């Protein structure tokens, strides 16, 4: 077993997830998947931030975070003195995003007219600036035991590099940055890159740790099966992830899911789920296309889907995304799971989570 | 303004044998027919330990100050002088893999902005923001800075889970390894401000006190000479100022008498047994130090971080620190609130003092930046975010007080320090874990 500072067992890798939770359904699914890996003790979600400057997206992220037991900031890094649970990061500035389609569940009402989902975020001051949030949480991790997964524009994450003294801190703490954006080795412009080309260009040019890119071609090759949404979530009648999935496009549809591949690789980099390109350098063109150039000693690689592993990967996607919120003694975060559907969990069932109201009778 | 036609230098002193008394800001210090000179900006940090009862601290809304919660209530007369800042975070106070010891960390990092080394031997922090300022502007005043306290100045030993007492008992750090211990004894401070610098034993001091006249008696000649050259406004100002010094002397004598009859007191000679009296003495001298431009930078550790001081004066025999770990018990929570209130009452008294000192068309408070706050918010859970922070005074008509300013979560306390350094004329690019400045000017 790995040992951390002071000889204690090293905890599983801490993942700071920054996703376009207002516009990318695979990013929403990735939060659910992270919950699944947390339940298995294979990863910890240490920070959750939205990639675009959108209060609605931040509110929706808060709803999801609360649904999954408030295990966002501080989850797993240990009680007293940790950053408060449930905090959401959001970049300062960047292209605005006033009406993110995935935040549609925030508008849902109960039969009595009250909102089905509520967020504690009422203004920008209830969020943290992404770069500070991630920096502060990284400092609470063992060296080399953290990763950042980006599934959206690089607006917030790249600003981490401008923070005083942050460069060496990032190098010490971050094993790798996994970017679910672009197309590789080259391809059409991808929306997350196009949304903030300057940020993407700076990220690929200056990020100091190993960087693994997950292109849209991997997402297309390994889509999340929409049938799972219909079949695997009966344990919760009000689930913001499911509601967002349904709201995003007419059902049924399979969702290209580079963000899920990024999470899977980050948690299990050695397990051969994907092939890796040779080392090289990724550059960003003016129109938002990404281009990979092989180079010995390059810090960048990209994932390559391995058709022989597709079935196993999609099975894992389904299991992890549909994982229930973890039980926490006396705490939130079990979804509003009807007792009859889960008698075993009923034994420790806490009250419904604060952000999710029980269904109307 | 009464104009005599000739001005006296800002650095005029009343001198006598073994005594030097600096003067306050007088109209006559302005050159004849010239515009009133701008008084200097002063900065003081007043630190309280063990967090604050946040439910009775935070105002409800951003913007103009609404109803004051219980702990803030004593500041009601000064509502137009206050900015309450919410959401500032000291990440360096958090565990960050160093385990228990939040009290040691939060105090050591409060003005340094860095994670201090967990040790009781080879201490390491960083230069504090007050000392960065003092290094730059300290040569303009008799004392580059003053470090004051009221509780405990032990510099060695383990004061919190492996953190040296040097972290809990100091706010100011000259360098990363050199804290500046606070002066606790009002007599020592008085002699430092006005005396010869001689260090006397308690017995010698007592002998001296028996025959001591007022320090003002030694400078009577100079004072008379000066008064004859002043206009009526300045004469009144000078009289008030000298009378405030005399008042401090009398308070000191009283405290020393009381300590003589309380030989069991575990306090330095001259330290009043009563918290409020001690506080008043120290802050009266802080007023004089600012008024006479003896220094422009003060750090005041009202009590050491993690203190278990009892407040019998207000009927609380329990230690402050144990009370803050109330675990939701109403009786202990009430005691914490009462202690917090007691502190703000004392501070409000001092603010009145600062406000009563006129400097041209403004007051000493207008020309000051008084930072009142703690290194923890919730002392029960040891939280290092949303630190209770007040900026009191206008910093020389620079800030726009009378409101609550909310910054985004995780905004570093160091950003606030950068803003204060800017106003003190000591701008630096980065400090601690800063990410920028706070905008406290625009509304």
Image (tube, rainbow, N blue to C red):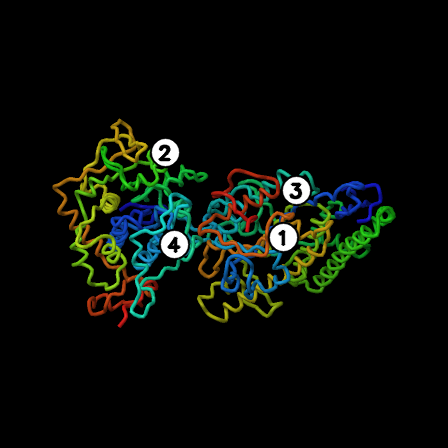
N-term-proximal mark, 3 vs 1: 3
Mark in front: 3 vs 2: 2
Front residue (pair A329, A308): A308
Q: Which residue is mark 4?
A: A87
- Mark 4 crowd level (few <14, some 14–19, many ≥20, 10 Å Cα): many
Q: In this orientation, does residue B152 appear?
A: no
The tag on residue B144 is 3
Q: Which residue is mark 1?
A: B393
Name the side, left or right, on which A125 lies relative to B425.
left
Q: CA distance from mark 1 to mark 2?
A: 43 Å
Name the side, left or right, on which B30 lies relative to B380.
right
- Horizontal and vertical percent for residue A192? 30, 42
Chain name for mark 4: A
Secondary structure, mark 4, is loop
N-term-proximal mark, 4 vs 2: 4
Q: Are marks 4 and 2 on the same chain?
A: yes
Q: Disc 3, disc 1: CB below 8 Å?
A: no
- Mark 3 crowd level (few <14, some 14–19, many ≥20, 10 Å Cα): many
Name the side, left or right, on which B385 lies relative to A265.
right
Front residue (pair B291, B333): B291
Chain name for mark 2: A
Q: Are marks 3 and 1 on the same chain?
A: yes
Q: Which residue is mark 2?
A: A206
* Quarter of the image with the C terminus of chain A in it: bottom left
Secondary structure, mark 3, is loop
Secondary structure, mark 1, is loop
The tag on residue B1 is none
């Amino acid at each position: 077993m790995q040992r951390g500072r002071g000889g204690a067992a090293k905890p599983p890798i801490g993942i700071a997830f920054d996703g376009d939770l207002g516009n990318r359904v695979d990013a929403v699914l990735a939060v659910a998947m992270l919950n699944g890996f947390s339940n298995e003790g294979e990863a910890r979600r240490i920070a959750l931030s939205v990639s675009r400057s959108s209060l609605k997206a931040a509110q929706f992220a808060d709803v999801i975070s609360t649904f999954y037991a408030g295990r966002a900031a501080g989850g797993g890094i240990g009680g007293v003195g940790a950053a408060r649970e449930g905090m959401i990061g959001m970049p300062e500035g960047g292209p605005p995003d006033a009406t993110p389609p995935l935040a549609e569940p925030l508008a849902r009402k109960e039969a009595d007219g009250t909102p089905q989902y509520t967020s504690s975020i009422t203004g920008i001051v209830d969020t943290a600036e992404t770069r500070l949030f991630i920096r502060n949480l990284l400092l609470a991790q063992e060296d080399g035991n953290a990763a950042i997964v980006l599934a959206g524009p690089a607006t917030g994450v790249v600003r981490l590099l401008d923070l005083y003294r942050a460069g060496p801190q990032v190098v010490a703490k971050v094993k790798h940055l996994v970017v679910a954006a672009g197309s590789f080795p080259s391809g059409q412009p991808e929306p997350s890159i196009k949304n903030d080309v300057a940020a993407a260009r700076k990220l690929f040019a200056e990020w100091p740790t190993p960087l693994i890119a997950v292109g849209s071609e991997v997402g297309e090759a390994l889509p999340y099966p929409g049938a799972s949404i219909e079949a695997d979530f009966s344990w919760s009648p009000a689930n913001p992830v499911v509601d967002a999935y349904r709201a995003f496009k007419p059902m049924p549809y399979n969702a290209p899911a580079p963000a899920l591949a990024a999470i899977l690789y980050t948690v299990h980099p050695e397990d051969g789920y994907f092939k890796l390109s040779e080392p090289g350098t990724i550059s960003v063109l003016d129109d938002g296309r990404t281009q990979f150039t092989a180079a010995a000693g390059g810090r960048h690689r990209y994932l390559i889907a391995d058709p022989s592993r597709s079935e196993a990967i999609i099975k894992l996607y389904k299991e992890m995304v549909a994982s229930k919120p973890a039980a926490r003694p006396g705490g939130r975060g079990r979804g509003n799971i009807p007792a009859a559907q889960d008698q075993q969990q009923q034994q420790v069932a806490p009250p419904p989570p604060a952000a999710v109201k029980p269904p109307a009778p | 303004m009464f104009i005599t036609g000739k001005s006296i230098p800002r650095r005029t002193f009343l001198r006598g044998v073994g005594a030097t008394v600096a003067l306050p800001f007088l109209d006559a210090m302005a050159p004849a027919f010239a515009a009133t000179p701008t008084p200097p900006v002063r900065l003081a940090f007043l630190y309280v330990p063990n967090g604050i009862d946040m439910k009775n601290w935070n105002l409800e809304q951003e913007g103009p100050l609404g109803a004051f919660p219980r702990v803030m209530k004593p500041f009601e007369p000064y509502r137009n002088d206050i900015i309450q800042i919410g959401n500032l975070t000291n990440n360096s106070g958090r565990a960050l893999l160093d385990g228990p010891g939040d009290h040691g960390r939060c105090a050591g990092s409060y003005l340094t902005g860095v994670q201090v080394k967990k040790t009781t031997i080879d201490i390491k922090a960083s230069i504090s923001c007050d000392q960065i300022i003092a290094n730059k502007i300290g040569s303009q005043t008799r004392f580059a800075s003053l470090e004051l306290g009221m509780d405990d100045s032990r510099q060695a030993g383990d004061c919190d889970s492996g953190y040296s007492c040097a972290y809990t008992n100091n706010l100011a750090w000259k360098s990363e390894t050199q804290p500046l211990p606070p002066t606790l004894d009002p007599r020592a401070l008085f002699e430092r401000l006005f005396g010869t610098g001689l260090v006397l034993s308690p017995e010698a001091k007592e002998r001296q006190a028996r025959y001591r006249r007022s320090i003002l008696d030694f400078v009577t000649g100079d004072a008379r000479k000066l008064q004859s050259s002043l206009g009526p406004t300045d004469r009144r100002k000078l009289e008030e100022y000298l009378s405030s010094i005399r008042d401090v002397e009398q308070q000191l004598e009283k405290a020393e008498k009381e300590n003589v009859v309380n030989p069991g007191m575990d306090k330095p000679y001259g330290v009043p047994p009563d918290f409020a009296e001690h506080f008043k003495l120290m802050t009266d001298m802080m007023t004089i130090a600012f008024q006479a431009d003896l220094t422009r930078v003060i750090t005041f550790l009202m009590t050491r971080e993690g203190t278990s001081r009892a407040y019998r004066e207000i009927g609380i025999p329990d230690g402050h620190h144990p009370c803050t770990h109330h675990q939701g018990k109403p009786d202990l929570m009430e005691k914490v609130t009462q202690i917090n209130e007691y502190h703000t009452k004392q501070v409000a008294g001092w603010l009145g003092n600062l406000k009563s000192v006129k400097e041209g068309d403004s007051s000493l408070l207008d020309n000051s930046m008084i930072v009142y706050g703690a290194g923890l918010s919730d002392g029960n859970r040891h939280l290092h975010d949303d630190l209770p922070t007040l900026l009191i005074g206008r910093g020389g008509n620079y800030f726009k007080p009378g409101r609550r300013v909310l910054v985004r979560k995780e905004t570093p306390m160091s950003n606030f320090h950068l803003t204060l350094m800017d106003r003190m004329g000591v701008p630096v690019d980065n400090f601690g874990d800063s990410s920028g400045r706070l905008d406290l000017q625009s509304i």
